[in-house]
Image (cartoon, helix red, strand yellow):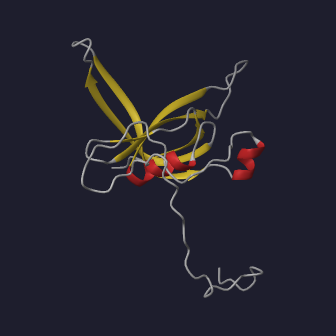
Amino acid sequence: MLNKVIIMGRLTADPELRQTPSGVSTCQITVAVDRNYTPQGGERQTDFITVVAWRQTAEFISRYFAKGRMIIVEGGLRTRTYDDKRYPDVRHYVTEVQAENVMFGETKAAAQANGNYAPQQFSQPKYSQPAPAQSAPQYAPQQNAPAPAVSFGDLGDFEEVIGDGDLPF
């Protein structure tokens, strides 16, 4: 059996990182994907596809993507149902892409040229609700806490490559 989806489009809103009660990160986004054809005498149509990401993929999306940014999502198609709490006889059917792999769809320079890039500090993901209190380390950002410094260690062992003629690939 095969269930593989690859879409490329733009985010319709800024992603919001959430956490389950057990502390697992999740993020739901909507990707606007233009169709490859234009009906005769009409406008190009766009599909709005719901994507759900979990754990590190969710944190990556919330940290590096924003509304209007081009994103490539690879994953599987999932369907689920749930009963409406307000109307007990109503059942909702949901189809969404569960992200397995996410990539940038454009360079930073292209995003800046299209007006879809705003420089941001990517030190902490944006959370929409605080994490539950647990003894394990939490992902929720601390208020008024400085961003952690990134250290690369000693880079003296690496040689600068001037041209690509010496590379084995």
Q: Residue at x 62, y 33 (%)?
A: 34
Q: Residue 35, relative to residue 58: is it above or below?
A: above
Residue in the image at 25% along x and 50% along y: 134
Give the vertical position of 78 relative to 56 (above or below): above
Picture coordinates of residue 71, whole percent (x, y): 58, 45
Q: Nearer the viewer, residue 46 or 158?
A: 158
Q: x, y percentage for residue 99?
A: 43, 47
Give the answer, above or below, for where 43 lies relative to 134: above
- 144 sits left or right of 32 in the view: left
Residue 54 appears anywhere in the view: yes
Please identify the quadrant where the C terminus is shown.
bottom right
Q: Is residue 104 left or right of residue 21?
A: right
Residue 21: percent from the left, percent from the top?
Answer: 26, 41
Query: Looking at this view, is 40 or 95 the one in front?
Result: 95
Q: Position of residue 51 (x, y in %)?
A: 45, 39
169 over 111 or under it: above or below:
below
Q: Is residue 100 visible?
A: no
Residue 164, image quadrant: bottom right
113 and 37: which one is in front?
113
